[in-house]
């Protein structure tokens, strides 16, 4: 799937639409999810044009991958959910209902999150 330069996270990265920023560095931007599903619901995105985790893990430089991985851990600590616990989710493709075709990791926490998946059948 080619990268869509007009997806909502690309537009946030270009400053065309606002976000509630919680962290930024050379490789990474993190902001609050617009429809939070837990008291802490932060999205962490690489700045590069990667559609999904599959795309990122194949195409990104080692510096981008290290920077992104470290940032996710740092942002979770800074959000204060390290001791209580949190969940990371990265949706990829139709079965996971990925809505935005720019890699993002959800950091969810701040309350007990229940079972990992809702049973659908
Ligand atoms: P996913 O289903 O994993 O692709 O999740 C996309 C997430 O992006 C959803 O949780 C949305 O609520 C969130 N989202 C969509 N537009 C925005 C926006 N403009 N600012 C912040 N979060 C957004």
Image (cartoon, helix red, strand yellow):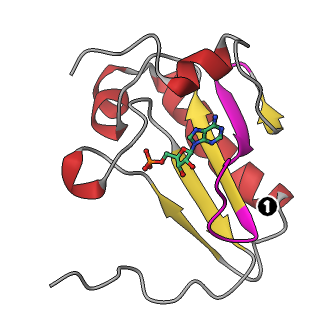
Q: Give yes or no for residue 27 being in the magenta stretch.
A: yes
Q: Residue at x 44, y 35 (%)?
A: 103
Mark 1 element type: helix
The spot of residue 72 in percent (x, y) is 64, 48
Quadrant of the snapshot with the N terminus: top left
User: On the image, which quarter does residue 18 sit in?
Assistant: top right
The spot of residue 17 in percent (x, y) is 71, 20
The span shown in magenta is 26-40
Considering only vertical position in the picture, is 13 above or below 44?
A: above
- For disc 1, the marked residue is 77
Q: Quadrant of ligand 1?
A: top right
Q: Is mark 1 within 8 Å of ligand 1?
A: no
The spot of residue 65 in percent (x, y) is 49, 32
Q: Residue at x 74, y 65 (%)?
A: 40
Q: Give yes or no for residue 35 being in the magenta stretch.
A: yes
Q: Nearer the viewer, residue 64 or 15?
A: 15
Quadrant of the snapshot with the C terminus: bottom left
Magenta stretch secondary structure, dominant: loop
Q: Residue at x 60, y 16 (%)?
A: 11
Considering only vertical position in the picture, is 74 above or below 15?
A: below
């Amino acid at each position: 799937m080619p990268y869509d330069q007009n997806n909502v996270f690309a537009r946030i990265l270009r400053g065309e639409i606002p976000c509630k920023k919680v962290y930024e560095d050379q490789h990474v931007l993190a902001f609050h999810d617009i429809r939070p599903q837990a008291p802490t619901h932060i999205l962490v995105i690489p700045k590069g044009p990667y559609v999904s985790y599959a795309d990122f893990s194949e195409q990104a430089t080692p510096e981008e991958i290290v920077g992104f991985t470290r940032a996710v851990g740092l942002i979770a600590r800074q959000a204060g959910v390290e001791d209580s616990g949190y969940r990371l989710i990265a949706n990829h493709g139709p079965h996971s209902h990925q809505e935005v075709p720019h890699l993002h990791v959800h950091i969810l926490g701040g309350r007990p999150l229940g079972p990992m998946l809702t049973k659908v059948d």
